[in-house]
Image (cartoon, grey):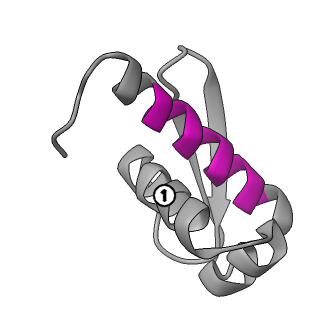
């Protein structure tokens, strides 16, 4: 089953994440982004690992990056 979740990023822009399983939250996007940075060389492999299509994987990475950078810029170090 595909789930579509509309969310608002730290920059105030809305985006929709489509997943073929559980809903992906903004916190999930950040955790998945950090996993991508530390453990994957390509978006294709990241997408395969998480069971996402390439477009959704890119959206998750982009949102996770934006959220992570916002937290770093604002000095937020705790979960």
Question: Which corner quadrant holds the N terminus?
Answer: bottom right
* Residue 24 can be seen, yes or no: no
Q: Is residue 11 magenta?
A: no
Residue at 72 percent of width and 61 percent of height: 57
Residue 54 picture location, percent across and down: 83, 66
Residue 43 appears in which quarter of the rendering?
A: bottom right
**Residue denoted by label 1:** 34
Indicate left or right for 58 with 14 as reference: right
Is residue 53 or residue 74 the one in the foreground?
Answer: 74
Mark 1 secondary-structure assignment: helix
Q: Quadrant of residue 39?
A: bottom right
- Pick the residue in front: 34 or 16: 34
Instruction: Report the residue that reaches farthest toward the left.
Output: 78
> Residue placed at 52% from the left, 27% from the top?
9
Could you say where residue 29 lies in the image, as x and y percent from the top left? 49, 52
Q: Which residues are magenta?
A: 56-69
Which percent across, then down, holds residue 37?
Answer: 59, 60
Image height of 9 relative to 16, above or below: above
| Closest to the observer, 35 or 14 | 35
Q: Is residue 56 above or below residue 8?
A: below
Looking at the rendering, which quadrant does residue 41 occupy?
bottom right
Q: Main secondary structure of the magenta part?
A: helix
Is residue 16 among the parts visible in the rendering?
Answer: yes
């Amino acid at each position: 089953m595909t789930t579509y979740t509309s969310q608002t990023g730290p920059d105030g822009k809305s985006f929709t994440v489509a997943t073929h399983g559980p809903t992906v939250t903004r916190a999930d996007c950040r955790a998945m982004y950090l996993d991508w940075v530390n453990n994957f060389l390509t978006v294709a492999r990241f997408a395969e690992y998480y069971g996402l299509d390439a477009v959704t994987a890119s959206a998750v990475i982009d949102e996770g990056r934006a959220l992570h950078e916002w937290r770093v810029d604002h000095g937020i170090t705790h979960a």
